[in-house]
Amino acid sequence: DTAVSQTPKYLVTQMGNDKSIKCEQNLGHDTMYWYKQDSKKFLKIMFSYNNKELIINETVPNRFSPKSPDKAHLNLHINSLELGDSAVYFCASSQWEKNEQFFGPGTRLTVL
Amino acid sequence: QKEVEQDPGPLSVPEGAIVSLNCTYSNSAFQYFMWYRQYSRKGPELLMYTYSSGNKEDGRFTAQVDKSSKYISLFIRDSQPSDSATYLCAMSRNNAGNMLTFGGGTRLMVKP
């Protein structure tokens, strides 16, 4: 049973396209996150959602928009993709009162 | 200067060695400290979670936090080839759904 799952695993697309990445967790957590891991392995928080409300929005371009239809899902939509968006995107979840975050397997995005 | 510094390695040790992995940080507000293990092309996996200064042991793993020196460590006893991975430290200011600040990771190679 996968705890945090993401689709797709790989995404190759052209500059200027719009794409979405989906995340689902079956841990019963109430908070979900999106992280970006660049080629140097640095993991940086992009967004978090608690009870369907955006809690944190780091200095992320507004081309990135998270959408949470319910507590178990947090999707990431990216408009007008740029070369610099190429990275691995990780979804994670936790209980709001705990900082132990559980990560998905990642989506490797390549923008050509 | 990054808030959390971690030597990228790689750190190469023989099987059975004791491994010491370290992070330093600059923000004295950090109170919660975590170690994640990340295998190649996988998501980070939570290994250890500690609060404030002190030690915590779990099997072959021991986490140490020295807040006065802003220094945290992860020790791995009797290292195994299966321990070969990138180890990421992470920390946060509070326990409530807060963002994690990650180090860049140390790549560990345990040779049989």
Image (spheres, coloured by chain):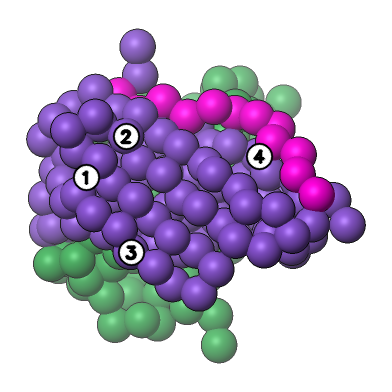
Chain colours: A green, B purple
Residue B4 rendering spot, x and y as whole percentages: 35, 28
Query: Which mark sits nearer the N-terminus, 2 or 4?
Result: 2
According to the picture, the residue beneath numbered tag 1 turns out to be: B92
At horizontal 19% and vertical 66% (from top left) the residue drawn is A98
According to the picture, the residue beneath numbered tag 4 turns out to be: B107
Quarter occupied by the N terminus of chain B: top left
Q: State which chain disc 1 sits on.
A: B
Q: State which chain disc 3 sits on.
A: B
Q: Secondary structure at mark 1?
A: strand
Query: Which mark sits nearer the N-terminus, 3 or 2?
Result: 3
Residue B9 rendering spot, x and y as whole percentages: 65, 30
According to the picture, the residue beneath numbered tag 3 turns out to be: B56
User: What is the C-alpha distance between the residues marked 3 and 4?
Assistant: 22 Å
Q: State which chain disc 2 sits on.
A: B
Residue B56 rendering spot, x and y as whole percentages: 33, 64
Which three-letter amino acid code belongs to the residue tagged 1? Ser
Q: Considering depth in this image, is B23 or B18 the residue closer to the camera? A: B18
| Residue B56 horizontal side relative to residue A23, left or right | left
Q: In the image, which residues are magenta?
A: B3-14
Residue A104 rendering spot, x and y as whole percentages: 51, 63
Quarter occupied by the C terminus of chain B: bottom right
Quarter occupied by residue A32:
bottom left
The answer to if B13 sits in the magenta stretch is yes
User: What is the C-alpha distance between the residues marked 4 and 1?
Assistant: 22 Å
Which three-letter amino acid code belongs to the residue tagged 2? Tyr
